[in-house]
Amino acid sequence: MSGVFLGGVIRLLMDPVVWGICLLLAFKTRSRGYAFRLALMLIVILSASIVLRITWIGEYTWQDFQQGLAAYLIVSSIVLLIFRHKPSLEQQLCTIVGTDLHRQIHAALTENEVLAGKRLNNLASTGYIFGFINAYLEAYPEYEPKSERMFKQILNGVLPNKLMAIFVSNYERYCIALDVERLKQEVEDFKLGVSIGASDAEKAQNYETPQNLELYLKGKKPITSPFLVALSKR
């Protein structure tokens, strides 16, 4: 590395404007991932430097670009170490809820994929999932305006695309069943699932491990809920 090249890099490293822009972008994007933040900083600073240099000097060489990339990569990396990624409270809540659901579903699918897969498509399971997630959202009413987005984020985090599709399809089935007398049992299954899911969510918020969805998917009797005993026999 030549002295001229190194000198250009050091000069850019000493530019307070570069540090100021990076610090501002890092602070504003704390809830985003590292790759996104780094790319954003490099694009913004390099673009600004190209425009300003062409405007003031009339040219921008390949060496200018290399020096800028090296310097701005160093500055961005240092700044991102200071302002590390901080998930939003919304993301943290989705992670907490999704982790409990994923653990139960994964355990059941691992033990008996055929049975668990079949039961996961039942209205009882969809009711449980709805009740579990909704109980958390009711406990944090400030997230109510974001409920649809959070439902989607949680479901896709548990089983990407698949669980969301099951949930939407079964909720539509439930809405239809409300007006069809012969589908009364499906309505009751869904409502029962909602109640059990809400109960398990309350336990989870009290640092107890929810298990009733896992047990239902495995075809086993629940540990605590007498209501799920009848449901697990179907």
Image: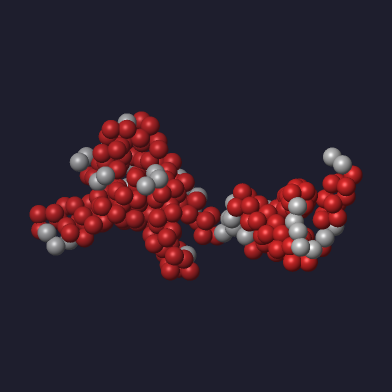
- Please indicate, yes or no, whether residue 229 appears anywhere in the rendered image: no
In this view of the protein, which residue sits in the foreground, 217 or 167? 167
Left or right side of 208 for 132: left
Q: Residue at x 68, y 54 (%)?
A: 42
Q: Residue at x 74, y 49 (%)?
A: 62
Left or right side of 185 for 88: right
Q: Residue at x 30, y 37 (%)?
A: 116
Measuring from the top left, give residue 100's x and y in whole percent.
Answer: 44, 46
Q: What color scheme is it?
A: secondary structure
The quadrant of the image that shows the C terminus is top left
Measuring from the top left, give residue 184's x and y in whole percent.
Answer: 14, 56
Q: Residue at x 36, y 36 (%)?
A: 108
Left or right side of 99 for 128: left
| 207 is higher (above) or lower (below) than 51 | above
Measuring from the top left, give residue 7's x and y in whole percent.
Answer: 88, 50
Kindly indicate the quadrant of the structure image that contains residue 13: bottom right
